[in-house]
Image (cartoon, grey):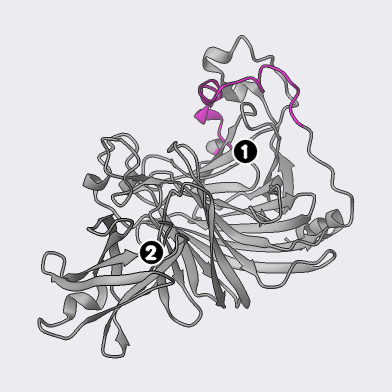
């Protein structure tokens, strides 16, 4: 949509105008449960009467969603705004406090498709709040969330949240397997035109293209940001919970431009921490849910083993920059406390434009095309030296399963400071993989960076395990 790109460019040359907030009425005072009780009536879904493969349903304003978005139905080259109608909603127990109004607008929308069975339209994609959106593939539960853009997150003071002002939904053909969504992004520092090509399936795939225009200089522009939750895993001991692990994602995976694959297990730190992985033309990165065993979570309701991984695949050369991983402390599993995103090396200067293209995979297994051994689990515990800690890293899958018994395999382990002790490597016949044990004795009490991979001679056999420990 060239006209949308031109519109975003023209908007960037004008002073920023904040969208109107909903009036301070009963809507703003709704609690989470009260807002959740306002449900769109499925029989009034957009395109329901046309028997198309997709349909759209809408979210009501209220609770934390106070900015209305405009949504257009695009067909035969013409855009028709979808009007808000209170009759489209079942207000549940809120009906007495909800004065009818035809001027409210929507908080967001969701798209439905026959994802898991031919006789039911499953919810597959949601756009709701600022520039947040999320999706699922077959047999998946909602978990990780993506964003259109991140600006100076935790680096230059208060974070700025760009938001989607308007959406255009291209009406699909009766035979369509994908749907196209266009969006206008805006904020005090930037405006942008976005197009999403969305293909639901075993892995729901989104091709994202965006053209951005800077109103102000942005020192750190976070492209393709991912937001997830990590509360605790087996290596963490501070939570008293019947479940062994609670998280939407358990690690950051990075395919570097040099060909190295890196795995960083996620943490719930005592204070916020930022990890920076400098790279050039990365092959991709993602926040993954690698552990797929129900026994690892034991949660019959939330089913964390069914949460999707989210992989970012650049569709062009991104040049020099870095993948940032921001981890924040959290005591609640409802708080997203992990963010990963790409930051180009050069600042985004006022008056400049940039185009970025990438593909998102919402999947149980990311398409990273790595054939080496993977980190299966990270564990840790106390050892016999005060202040020291033992770490255990399990590698399996890939080429490791084909290594003959007796083949010399070594563990390459390094630490940024302190002393390494008791390094032991065992073959694990139960997984056809290997387990590495080692102790780290700190010499100065500060953050320690650790790396570990397996090799046979000079040949790398596995991805690189990378971890931070603050004694």
Tell me the quarter of the picture where residue 436 sits: bottom left
Q: Residues within 10 Å of mark 2 (few under 14, many from 20)?
A: many
Left or right of 463, for residue 187: right
Q: Quadrant of residue 9?
A: bottom right
Q: Which residues are magenta?
A: 21-47
**Between 359 and 144, the one nearer to me in the picture:** 144
Which residue is under mark 2?
Answer: 442
The secondary structure type at the circle numbered 2 is loop
**227 left or right of 353?**
left
Where does the N terminus fall, quadrant-wise?
Answer: bottom right
The residue lying at 28 percent from left, 62 percent from top is 391
Instruction: Name the mark on residue 282.
Output: none
The residue pinned by badge 1 equals 108
Residue found at the very far bottom of the displayed protein: 458
Residue 39, x across and y down, in percent: 53, 25
Residue depth check, mark 1 versus mark 2: number of the one nearer the observer: 2
Q: Is residue 201 magenta?
A: no
- Residue 117, compared with residue 355, is above or below; it is above
Where does the image place residue 149, in percent across and percent down from the top left? 65, 55
Residue 113: x and y in percent read 46, 46
When asked about the image quadrant of residue 118, the answer is top left
Q: Marks 1 and 2, Cα distance to the nearest angstrom? A: 50 Å
Residue 236 is left or right of residue 293, and the answer is right
């Amino acid at each position: 949509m060239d006209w949308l790109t031109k519109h975003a460019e023209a908007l960037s040359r004008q002073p920023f105008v904040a969208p109107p907030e909903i009036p301070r009425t009963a809507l703003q005072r709704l609690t989470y449960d009260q807002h959740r009780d306002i449900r769109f009536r499925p029989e009034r879904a957009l395109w329901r009467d046309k028997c198309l493969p997709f349909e759209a349903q809408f979210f009501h304003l209220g609770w934390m969603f106070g900015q209305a978005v405009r949504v257009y139905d695009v067909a035969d080259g013409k855009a028709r705004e979808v009007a808000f109608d209170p009759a489209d909603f079942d207000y549940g127990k809120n009906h007495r406090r909800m004065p009818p109004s035809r001027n409210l607008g929507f908080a967001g929308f969701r798209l439905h498709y026959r994802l898991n069975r031919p006789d039911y339209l499953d919810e597959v994609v949601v756009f709701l709040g600022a520039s947040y959106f999320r999706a699922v593939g077959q047999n998946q539960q909602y978990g990780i969330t993506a964003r259109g853009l991140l600006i100076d997150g935790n680096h230059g003071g208060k974070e700025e949240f760009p938001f989607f002002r308007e959406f255009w939904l291209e009406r699909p053909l009766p035979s369509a397997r994908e749907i196209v969504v266009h969006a206008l992004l805006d904020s005090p520092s930037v405006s942008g035109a976005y197009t999403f090509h969305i293909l639901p399936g075993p892995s729901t795939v989104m091709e994202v293209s965006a053209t951005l225009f800077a109103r102000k200089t942005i020192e750190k522009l976070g492209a393709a940001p991912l937001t997830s939750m990590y509360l605790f895993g087996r290596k963490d001991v501070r939570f008293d919970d019947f479940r062994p692990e609670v998280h939407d994602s358990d690690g950051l995976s990075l395919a570097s431009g040099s060909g190295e694959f890196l795995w960083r297990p996620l943490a719930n730190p005592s204070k916020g921490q930022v990890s920076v992985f400098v790279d050039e033309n990365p092959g991709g990165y993602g926040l993954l849910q690698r552990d797929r065993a129900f026994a690892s979570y034991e949660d019959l309701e939330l089913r964390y083993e069914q949460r999707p991984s989210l992989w970012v695949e650049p569709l062009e050369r991104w040049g020099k920059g870095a993948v940032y991983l921001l981890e924040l402390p959290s005591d609640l599993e409802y708080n997203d406390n992990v963010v990963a995103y790409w930051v180009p090396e050069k600042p985004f200067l006022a008056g400049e434009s940039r185009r970025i293209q990438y593909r998102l995979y919402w999947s149980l297994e990311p398409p990273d095309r790595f054939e080496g051994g993977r980190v299966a689990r990270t564990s840790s515990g106390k050892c016999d030296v005060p202040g020291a800690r033992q770490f255990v890293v399990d590698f399996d899958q890939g080429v490791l399963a084909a290594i003959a018994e007796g083949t010399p395999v070594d563990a390459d382990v390094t630490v940024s400071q302190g002393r390494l002790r008791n390094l032991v490597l065992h073959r694990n016949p139960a997984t056809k993989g290997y387990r590495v044990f080692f102790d780290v004795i700190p010499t100065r009490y500060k953050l320690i960076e650790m790396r570990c991979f397996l090799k046979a001679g000079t040949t790398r056999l596995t991805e690189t395990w990378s971890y931070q420990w603050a004694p």
